[in-house]
Image (cartoon, grey):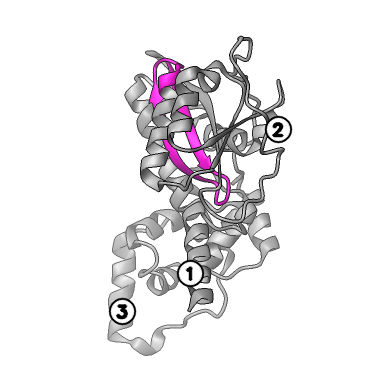
């Protein structure tokens, strides 16, 4: 049965990976295939995936996503890859074999709002339902510990699709860090004048240089209420997912190592990670779907 499963799915998963997942030898599979070639009538394809075969799919996706997916996302990923199975069956198999997504953890804030710089009004007011791309962006800073010291990450997120459209990393948490992330986002997207950029009240975002850059790009500044992280929940959620799904428990000898891991996760997040707010589409696929629908209406 195991060799029959591998044969049926060798165009979906590499043979070597399936053999490892099912704990069988590759040579045994090739001998099985040779026998089937000599006697095609002996092949007996099953009508339903056995638990062991389904578990092989589940483990492969779970490891591919580096433990980031719990059963709801993993079940949808199975469907997207043409593997049909019930939600409850997937949940029970994952639970029985200890396949559990990493749990949430609390992290300290990096905001320093104890300054005398001007503060922008809260234009967003926690309205995270945006009808089109490049209308509202949010930004924030987080940190990663390495044996060389802290590494700081600043991101810019398009609230419409939750896509990270700009980011920057540095060993110092300065206004240059957030300006670099904003510039990257602007050069990539070239939004129309009037975009709302929302952040916390940190001194980096309140600085004259950052506010000047917003003005140069024709953007309107917006800031959270003091000490209220929920006003910037989109970015806080992204940082939580990054740390829980990828960084927690990892040891970084150098900042370069940490940077590579962050960039890899951001690429995965934008291109592939299923987002519950977006109907379990990735941010980039959500935008593509919206563009296709828009073009269909125009046609």
Judge by depth and name the residue closer to the eye, 119 or 60. 119
N-term-proximal mark, 1 vs 2: 2
**Kind of element beneath mark 1:** helix
* Distance from the alpha carbon under mark 1 to that under mark 2: 32 Å
Residue 257 x %, y %: 34, 27
Along the line of sight, the residue nearer the viewer: 252 or 153: 153
Q: What range is drawn magenta here?
A: 150-176
Circle 1 is placed at which residue position?
Answer: 292
Q: Is residue 202 above or below residue 14?
A: above
Mark number, residue 35: 3
User: What number is the disc on residue 167?
Assistant: none
Residue 167 spot, x, y in % from top left: 42, 34
Q: Residues within 10 Å of mark 2 (few under 14, many from 20)?
A: some
Relative horizontal placement of residue 210, taking residue 280 as reference (left or right): left
Q: Residues within 10 Å of mark 3 (few under 14, many from 20)?
A: few
Q: In the image, which is nearer the foreground, mark 1 or mark 3?
A: 1
Query: Taking 138 as reference, is 227 above or below it?
Result: above
> Which element is circle 2 on?
helix
**Membership of 296 in magenta stretch:** no
Q: Residue furthest bottom?
A: 41
Q: Which mark is residue 230?
A: 2
* Residue 193 percent location from the top left of the image: 49, 44
- The answer to whether residue 180 is above or below residue 77 is above
Q: Secondary structure at mark 3?
A: helix
């Amino acid at each position: 049965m195991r060799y029959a499963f591998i044969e049926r799915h060798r165009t979906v998963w590499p043979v070597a990976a399936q053999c490892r997942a099912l704990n069988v030898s590759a040579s045994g599979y090739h001998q099985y295939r040779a026998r089937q070639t000599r006697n095609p009538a002996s092949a007996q394809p099953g009508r339903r995936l056995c638990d062991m075969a389904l578990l092989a799919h589940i483990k492969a996706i779970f490891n591919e996503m580096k433990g980031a997916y719990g059963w709801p996302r993993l079940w949808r990923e199975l469907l997207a890859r043409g593997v049909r199975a019930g939600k409850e069956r997937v949940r029970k198999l994952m639970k029985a074999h200890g396949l559990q997504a990493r749990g949430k953890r609390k992290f300290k804030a990096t905001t320093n709002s104890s300054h005398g710089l001007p503060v922008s009004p809260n234009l967003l007011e926690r309205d995270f339902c945006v009808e089109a791309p490049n209308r509202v962006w949010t930004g924030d800073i987080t940190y990663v510990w390495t044996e060389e010291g802290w590494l700081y990450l600043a991101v810019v997120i398009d609230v419409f699709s939750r896509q990270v459209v700009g980011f920057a990393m540095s060993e110092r948490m300065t206004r240059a860090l957030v300006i670099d992330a904003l510039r990257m986002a602007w050069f990539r997207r070239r939004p129309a004048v009037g975009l709302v950029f929302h952040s916390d009240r940190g001194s980096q975002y309140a600085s004259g240089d950052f506010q000047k850059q917003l003005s140069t790009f024709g953007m309107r500044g917006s800031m959270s209420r003091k000490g209220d992280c929920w006003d910037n929940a989109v970015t806080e959620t992204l940082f939580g997912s990054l740390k829980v799904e990828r960084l927690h428990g990892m040891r970084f000898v150098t900042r370069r190592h940490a940077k590579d891991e962050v960039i890899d996760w951001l690429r995965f997040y934008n291109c592939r990670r299923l987002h519950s707010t977006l109907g379990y589409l990735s941010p980039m696929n959500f935008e593509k779907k919206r563009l296709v629908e828009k073009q269909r209406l125009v046609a």
